[in-house]
Amino acid sequence: MLNTYFRVIVGVMVLLSVVLAVYVNINWLWFTVFIGVNLIQSAFTKWCLLETILVKLGVKKEGKGCSI
């Protein structure tokens, strides 16, 4: 379940930042860069902030969380 929530939230954030970059300001693409860097960081450290937040909110942890 955690993996599903993680993928949906990250996908929405990426799409939202692209839409904001197109219609508001191109600098919103920096948010997309931040998301990408965070995903790469979590692949090496096996820790991500979003996973920690979701677990504290009560989402059941199944499998490896952020690692796909």
Image (cartoon, rainbow, N blue to C red):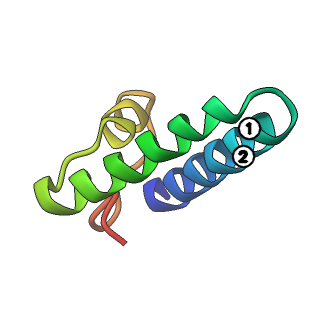
x, y percent for residue 67: 30, 66
User: What residue sits right under mark 2 in the picture?
Assistant: 18
Relative image position of residue 36 (x, y in whole percent)? 42, 53
Query: Is disc 2 placed on a helix, strand or loop?
Result: helix
Q: Which residue position is annotated with label 1?
A: 21
Of the pair 55 and 7, the residue shown nearer to us: 7
Q: Residue at x 38, y 30 (%)?
A: 53
Q: Amino acid at mark 1?
A: Ala
Using residue 6 as the reference point, say whether residue 19 is left or right of it: right
Disc 1: CA contacts within 10 A as few (<14), some (14-19) or many (>=20): some
Please tell me whether residue 49 is drawn above or below residue 41 in the rendered image. Answer: above
Q: Is residue 52 left or right of residue 45?
A: right
- Contact between marks 1 and 2 (CB within 8 A): the answer is yes
* Mark 2 residue type: Val
Assign the C terminus to one quadrant of the image: bottom left
Q: In the image shown, does 58 or 46 lie closer to the viewer?
A: 46
Q: Callout 2: 10 Å neighbours few (<14), some, many (20+)?
A: many
The residue positioned 87% from the left and 34% from the top of the image is 23
Cα–Cα span, label 1 and label 2: 5 Å
53 vs 44: above or below: above
